[in-house]
Amino acid sequence: MNQFGLKQEQRLKLTMTPELRQAIQILQYSSEELMSYLREQAKENPVIDLQEYDIYIAGESRENLKSKSANTEEMLDWVAKPSDTLYEHLKSQLGLVCGLTCMQRKTALYLIGNLDEKGYLAMDALEVAGLIGVNLAEVLAMLALVQGFEPAGIAARNLEECILLQLRRSGEEDELAIAVVQRHLAGLAANRLQRIADALGAGISEVQQVSDRIRRLNPFPGAAFTHNEHRYIRADITVEQSSSGEYRVRLSDIGSPQVAVNPYYRQMLRALPEQEEARQFIHDKYSTACWLIKSLEQRRQTLTRVAEAIVTMQHDFFDGGIHGLQPLTQKEIAESTGLHESTISRAVNNKYMQTPRGLFELKYFFTSALAAANGETASSESAKKRIRQLIDEEDKRKPLADQTIAEMLAQEGLEISRRTVAKYREEMRCLSSAKRKRF
């Protein structure tokens, strides 16, 4: 029988405070995300004094920059002009065509407006005729007009028509090329050139030449006008080599604003009476700013420790390049630094390191291990580089199969399966041996 009553007991549990949650967020922010976050905090909190790092062109001083700007173009001239959209690009070409009636111009504009981002006409010509109330012949005539605009291949209704339009524009359209495009486009994509040559009664070298011409064409002529937002990478960490050969780690100043407490509000906090409502408001904002500064300092210390551990464990990479890249896990860095593995994961997330060998994402240095014949291990990145090198140096008439590459690597002391070779090859966007073969 259940008995009801009151009793006391103690329980221990971990509570995620807002301050701890903020520290975790700050640690995993990239440089640009951190700057955006700090700007928002500075707008909401008047106690925060945010000072961003000034970036000068080519690292020049403000005085040199001022003296040069007096004799050169304005700084606004350095700003890139936004490119035209595909619609505006084609509309401007249509404006140069004389002798069109109002309805013909309207039809052409309607066709231009219905091109997708790849430059293809997404509607059937008969459907267009019914929607705008003109006959089919008029629509086809305006479609042919638009297809004559730049870039070549624009306003095609399918891939076949797109390629034929470009061949015709380049003057390389012949009977063999037309036959290959119209009847064997899928076989061409699979590089089945011998089968195509047998089916068309042509020489394999002729089909190879046609294949080369077609592969140089652009299957998506409108894609060049698709404007994606550019993402600029700023290094969070810089590794420099001293004259003695040692590598030193420092956090980059660019993109890392300095946060301090505004001295005016600090004085006001001391001057206001204890019970004043304004004092309580400033006190809360002051505490928030102090915690933010503490979180930023903790972020700097954590990133420095993690970066120094990576440089120490990947010393052979910094000395000899990718062949010296050693297998490394986040658990090993955690054990080396005394930090939790989840902290390492957040610290390397979206962070970049500027090294004497180039700019690398911190995750680049964490690679899986492959067994070597001498009992040692090699990194997957060095294996990928060797696979790429073997493919680049192969005889294209007899390309190396994945199994052959695996056997060659085994002879070099690297044990790797055919399936792993295929996986790495696909990650590097290398075609299979059948599609790499040339005749």
Image: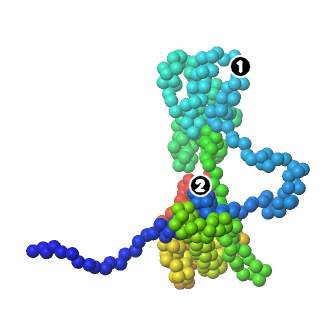
Q: Which residue is drawn at 51% across and 43% down?
A: 186
Q: Quadrant of the N terminus?
A: bottom left
**Residue 368 visible to the viewer:** no
Say which mark, if any, is on residue 437.
Answer: 2
Q: Position of residue 201 (x, y in %)?
A: 57, 39
* Residue 289 at x, y percent in the picture: 58, 67
From the viewer's perspective, is 219 left or right of 128? right
Estimate the x, y position of residue 182 in percent, counting from the top left.
54, 35
Q: In this view, does 408 lie to the left or right of 96?
A: left
Q: If you read the primary sequence from the N terminus, does the residue marked by circle 1 or circle 2 appear first?
A: 1
Q: Residue furthest left?
A: 1
279 w.r.t. 164: above or below: below
Which residue is drawn at the image coordinates 67% and 37% (left, top)?
A: 84
Q: Which residue in the structure is indicated by mark 1?
A: 98
Which quarter of the picture shows residue 273?
bottom right
Q: Residues within 10 Å of mark 2 (few under 14, many from 20)?
A: some
